[in-house]
Amino acid sequence: MGTDKGSGWGQGPPESHNPLPAAVPYNETEAKRFLNYYEQTANTVLKEFVEATWNYVTNITKPNREEMLQKELERSQFMKYFSTRAHLFNITQIQDPTVKRMLSKLKEIGKAALPYEELWEYNKLVAYMETAYSLAEVCLDEGPCMILEPDLEEVMATSRDHRELLWAWEGWRDSVGRQLRPIFWRCVELSNKAAQLNGYKDMGQLWRAKYESDTLEQDLEQIYQELQPLYLNLHAYVRRALYRHYGPELISLQGPIPAHLLGDMWAQSWNNILDMVLPFPKKPLVDITHMMKRQHWRSEKMFEEADKFFTSLGMLSVPPDFWKKSMLERPTDGRSVECQTSAWDFYTGNDFRVKKCTEVTLEDMLSVFHQMGHIQYFMQYQNLSVIFREGANPAFEEAVGAMVTLSASSHRHLFSTGLINLQQQDSEEEVNYLMGMALEKIAFIPFSYLMDLFRWRVFDGTIDKNIYNQEWWNLRLKYQGLCAPVPRTEDDFDPAAKFHVAANVPYTRYFVSTVLQFQLHEALCNASGYVGPLHQCDIYSSKIAGRILGNALKLGSSKPWPEVLKELTGQSTISTSAIMTYFKPLLNWLVVENVRQGEILGWPDYTCFFSERGTNKVALLGLQMKPDQVTFLLWILLGVNFVMFLALLGLAYRLYFLERWTPHQQPSHLPATVANEVSIRHCGSAWQMHTYPGPAGFTRLQQMPQ
């Protein structure tokens, strides 16, 4: 396979290997031969691309970036070549549904449809944005600089000082968002061109096409509306708790919540403030993170536990190379890496890896289970055509791992792993547990919805590039009931403070998977024979549940996702019934508590409190400066003014005495040689005044020794 422009896949394979000679009949037989040829070559091209990308994100250097960009270009040329030829087949005349589906998928190639130069530009821009995000730091005035993971995330999770939270929140956005704004706009232009070359109006429409539904936008809005009562009750309750802690200076009981007070850099998950909002404080949840550290858990043990969970279901264990090749912790050898957690399939059938800067915490343990769900999906569909080696839809890929975390985080499972000592929970402890889950799952719903709403409207032109930030915060206010803690301008670009915007990764998958994971959980719990509250179910060691799940995962994307969902759950549409069932005990408690407190659901007062105005930037002399910088400069100006005042006072003082004591006429008895020299005395000091004739006629005062 050639790699340069002249002989690479952009020009097609060598003629002797061309699967479709000029005179070939484009019938079903030839289609199968064509697809078989694609299968023989695709794995090699994709493996080389994934390998180069892995090398870059685990060792961010310029040579690795150039190698990644080159392999990405080769992959795109390869995809464009086969897409062009797939379009030569008339799909309506093909009878085999599998062949028809494969050709349809092969036709759509996303950004690879761009012309060579623009594709190269697009790849470089996205690589730059990802790198800028990964390497960004926020620096103390006098002290070290902090990176996002784990430094700034720990500040946001643990600090209860609103000034410190504001410093981290604003600093991260100043460091990342502003520099990416002009680059993002160019990526939007190129993305839309790629979408149009694929036959779509804009990139938003192409993203939505992955769900194979003409009513996706309406369906998502319906899901959001069905879950809104649960979110509004949670929002009102949390707002009251924050009001008790921070007071009316920061929180309005009828307004939105400042986005920096919710325990997370993006306010997408609120579980880090559970201690502030616990319904029954006298019955706190066991600190699982503390127990893990006390029992000397390591990052590798967390992955081992997740692998053991899947094998208990009769599913596959990760191959030995997983442990050798994965990046399970941040390297200590000085390499710069991209810490965004991800799972990788290297298209060899036995090379799967996870990239994660793991910390020993409950949050990271659940993230590990989630990533191992991706790995399990990869392993299950390895026997399929490379075209079908992906989730039934993008949300399925996320839902599998997330579904497993519902069991892994259950009280029953934590007890079985020795992280909890008490086997049973009473009703108050259950409400506390469900509150913790809601702060993670329910709080996430509007955020995961609006992330792509914003970008869809950017792609279709509804949101103009001159009002990006304004419309971003309008959506966050409308759907989340949040506001920025300090005034924002169009110099800022706060969406890019989230990795998926910087990396141009769609986000709807996370919204849909939040609902879908509960639907899968309920179905597998029922299949396992479990009877009881859904939030107490743990499918660990259920071979029946494992068989049902494995059979569905083996299908990859070979069938439309409603068929896969029906095989798993007996339903062909996504339903909010299971998630509402799971949280019903908490919702009942929230409704009663909010009525008792007289809470207003929603945020009818749209006012955003900027009570930290003392820490905001101040305009002075045409510059935007921090308050401490302004104070320092004002002291300097005051000092300069004082010195100038003393100088003027001294000059006036001297002129006064000169005017008073200088003779108006020269003494007649003085010789001519000394007629211009006069001695005056003042306050015990002798001064000699020299008058020099000349055009300037200036006078010099010189102090004489006493």
Image: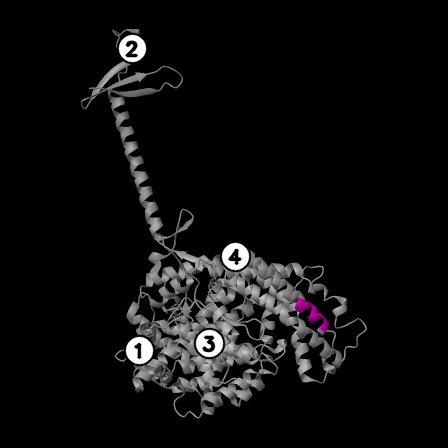
Name the secondary structure under disc 1. loop
**Residue at the spot 25% in from the left edge and 79% down from the top edge:** 282
Label 2 to label 4, Cα distance in Å? 83 Å
Report the span colored magenta. 78-85
Going by the image, does 99 lie left or right of 667?
Answer: right
Decide: marks 2, 1 in contact (CB < 8 A)?
Answer: no
How packed is label 4: few (under 14 Cα within 10 Å), some, or many (20 or more)? some
> In which quarter of the view is residue 186 placed?
bottom right
Residue at image mark 2: 675
Q: Is residue 557 left or right of residue 37?
A: left
At a point 42% along the width and 87% down the height, the residue shown is 581
Q: Looking at the image, which residue is at 53% across and 63% down? A: 55
Q: Principal SS element in the magenta part?
A: helix
Which residue, given by chain and number where applicable, does mark 3 sit on? 370
Tag in front: 2 or 4: 4
Q: Say what amino acid the circle numbered 3 marks.
A: His
Badge 1 is on which residue?
Answer: 286
Residue 82 sits inside the magenta stretch: yes
Residue highlighted by disc 4: 61
Name the amino acid type tagged 2.
Ala
